[in-house]
């Protein structure tokens, strides 16, 4: 393995390689204004690009400028190679279908590592490899990996272009699919390079499809170097490095160092009939309805309410001068789950994905339109399934992969908030933590205070979904919906949350929610989707001190009339069940929570233990 990737080159070697390569690179990314004398001195990013090229040996290097012309050129190239399939341009203008390798359809958590010098810094929540070993092992896979391929250099900004809270990343990839998706998901190209200038303050992300073999697939994070290596996968969460790898795993580690929060949360604004708008951030595990909730359409019964989308997957939150928590959405697009998406569950996203969208692993109808389970209307009489095989409604297999996705620009979404690109972000008044739980967890309840709220987030558990490889429907602990995304020891992460609370003079109120309670016959107790606004109205009323609540051992629950259920098919028995506190069930849950917390040893803040013991005492009282 060449030592080029293992550590920084010595200045002499670096300069020799870089000054040659950098000139070529400069000529290629001719959108930049370069004074002649500047050509002698490669910028840090040019040096890194040339170092990587020495090892991965691409056929050529293409610096992405993020222009529409470049996007179109890449699309045409992928249509020619079959990487993309053109959809019906009349019905879906600017939309394409991509079929991934059948072994590469979801995040692979077991192949995802945090490579810190000390294992305890990664914590029991992460797979760990020592950095040197990781570089030795995976560096060998990068050697020559881009031979006969174009290497795309993708500079991007996470966050609004002019926000002081935004950060810059550069992804080097040999996948044009990744390059075009990064243009949808981030502010990509010239704007990022202009903001970066000659600085070396950016997150480096190196990605190669490798040979797509799961045996040679690794997603590595080096928080101490702000570096990501990903090889062997083209799947969004593994390959669009701005998203989970940067905005959450490295982002969370950076946020701890710098005093902010990087969270797996949607952000929305609720406008009441009075005109007052209140912003809410909500953490749900993958494929638990964040996209739908962020774009919620108030049902006809909820006259005068409007929901405005700020973000649907990730929130970066900073303490404002006013002591409130201010959130930006670092992304510029949505990477949403297709199955189950329809005009009832999410009309806003249905309007968004009608143009300029890349669909991955959905089925293809004879009219060249996309299809997935749960789409409006009857299924097509025949189709090609997500692998391109003939499919009919009688087939025993699904037409679309359960984790099939769309990548679509946020700016196309009808419910986007006027504030979604506000450089300061929006002030968060409430935070929700929600899992997918058939039992035990009430529809909604509120924490007693910030510390108890952190405990509510820390004790989240949820049934697994198809967003990650592995068994679906198994309850697993997933604190703050961050288990797969916290880039450091989660014990320290809880400590960071507690410290953040001390810096907030007007902290958001914290709630648990659960839209997924079921009867013993497996029927949902709560209608969900747009009707969740009724629950959000109680949240708003609590935030603004306009309604009382019942104090119970687990937190504040709505009074029996607290949630307006007028016109809903929710029986009084169902409502009772939705708000019951099953003490023996909770005692069992406490035991499971404590077993989980024990794993973090000394890293677990004493306040979390205190909350756990206090909950047990209240339940026994
Ligand atoms: C996602 C995920 O893609 O959480 O957003 O897996
Ligand atoms: Mn997500």
Image (cartoon, rainbow, N blue to C red):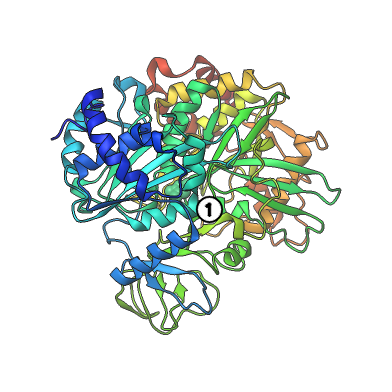
Q: Which one is in front, 619 or 557?
A: 557
Ligand 1 within 8 Å, label 1 CB: no
Task: Spot the residue most to the front.
Answer: 36
At which x and y percent is residue 65? Answer: 45, 51
Q: Which one is in front, 499 or 355?
A: 355
- Give the left or right position of residue 228, taking residue 331 as reference: left
Q: Residue at x 43, y 26 (%)?
A: 490
Q: Residues within 10 Å of mark 1 (few under 14, many from 20)?
A: many
Task: Spot the residue most to the right.
Answer: 274
Q: Which residue is mark 1?
A: 333
- Give the left or right position of residue 432, taking residue 240 as reference: right
Q: Residue at x 40, y 58 (%)?
A: 403
The answer to whether residue 612 is seen in the rendering is no
Decide: is 614 above or below 272. above
Helix, strand or loop under label 1:
strand
- Give the left or right position of residue 410, taking residue 3 as reference: right
Q: Which one is in front, 62 or 463?
A: 62
For the N terminus, the image quarter is: top left
Decide: is 280 above or below 595. below
């Amino acid at each position: 393995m060449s030592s080029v990737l293992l550590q920084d080159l010595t200045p002499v070697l670096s300069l020799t390689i870089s000054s040659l390569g950098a000139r070529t690179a400069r000529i290629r990314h001719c959108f930049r204004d370069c004074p002649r004398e500047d050509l002698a001195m490669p910028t840090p990013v040019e040096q890194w690009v040339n170092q990587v090229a020495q090892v991965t040996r691409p056929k050529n290097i293409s610096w992405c400028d993020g222009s529409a012309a470049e996007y179109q050129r890449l699309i045409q190239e992928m249509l020619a190679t079959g990487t993309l399939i053109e959809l019906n341009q009349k019905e879906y203008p600017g939309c394409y279908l991509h079929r991934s390798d059948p072994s590469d359809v979801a995040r692979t958590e077991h192949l995802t590592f945090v490579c810190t010098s000390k294992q305890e810094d990664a914590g029991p929540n992460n797979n760990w490899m020592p950095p040197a070993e990781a570089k030795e092992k995976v560096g060998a896979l990068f050697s020559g990996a881009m031979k006969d391929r174009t290497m795309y250099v993708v500079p991007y900004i996470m966050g609004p272009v002019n926000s002081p809270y935004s950060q810059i990343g550069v992804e080097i990839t040999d996948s044009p699919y990744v390059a075009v998706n990064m243009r949808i998901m981030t502010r990509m190209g010239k704007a990022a390079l202009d903001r970066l200038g000659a600085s070396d303050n950016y997150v480096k992300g190196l990605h190669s499809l490798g040979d797509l073999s799961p045996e040679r697939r690794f997603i590595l994070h080096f928080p101490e170097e702000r570096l990501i290596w990903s090889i062997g996968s083209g799947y969004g969460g593994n390959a669009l490095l701005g998203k989970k790898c940067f905005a959450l795993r490295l982002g969370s580690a950076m946020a701890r160092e710098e005093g902010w929060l990087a969270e797996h949360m949607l952000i929305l604004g609720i406008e009441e009939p009075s005109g007052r708008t209140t912003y809410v951030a909500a953490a749900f595990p993958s494929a638990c309805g964040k996209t739908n909730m962020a774009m919620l359409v108030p049902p006809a019964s909820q006259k005068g309410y409007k929901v405005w989308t700020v973000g649907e997957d990730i929130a970066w939150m900073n303490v404002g001068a006013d002591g409130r928590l201010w959130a930006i959405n670092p992304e510029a697009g949505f990477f949403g789950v297709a199955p189950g998406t329809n005009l009832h569950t999410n009309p806003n996203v249905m309007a968004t994905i009608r143009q300029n969208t890349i669909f991955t692993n959905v089925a293809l109808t004879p009219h060249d339109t996309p299809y997935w389970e749960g789409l409006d209307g009857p299924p097509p009489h025949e189709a090609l399934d997500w692998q391109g095989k003939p499919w009919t409604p009688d087939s025993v297999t699904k037409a679309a992969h359960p984790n099939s996705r769309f990548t679509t620009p946020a700016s196309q979404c009808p419910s986007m908030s006027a504030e979604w690109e506000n450089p300061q972000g929006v002030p968060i008044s409430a935070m929700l933590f929600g899992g997918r739980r058939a039992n035990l967890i009430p529809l909604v309840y509120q924490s007693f205070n910030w510390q108890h709220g952190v405990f509510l987030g820390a004790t989240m558990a949820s049934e697994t979904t198809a967003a990650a490889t592995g068994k679906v429907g198994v309850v697993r602990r997933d604190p703050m919906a961050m288990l797969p995304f916290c880039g450091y020891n989660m014990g320290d992460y809880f400590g960071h949350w507690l410290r953040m609370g001390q810096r907030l003079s007007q902290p958001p109120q914290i709630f648990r929610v659960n839209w997924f309670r079921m009867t013993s016959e497996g029927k949902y107790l709560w209608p969900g989707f747009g009707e969740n606004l009724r629950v959000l109205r109680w949240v708003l009323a609590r935030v603004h001190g306009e309604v009382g609540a019942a104090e119970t051992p687990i937190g504040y629950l709505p009074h029996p009339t607290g949630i307006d259920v007028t016109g809903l098919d929710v029986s009084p028995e169902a409502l009772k069940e939705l708000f019951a506190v099953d003490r023996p069930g909770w005692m069992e849950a406490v035991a499971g929570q404590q077993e989980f917390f024990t794993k973090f040893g000394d890293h677990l803040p004493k306040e979390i233990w205190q909350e756990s013991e206090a909950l047990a005492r209240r339940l026994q009282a």
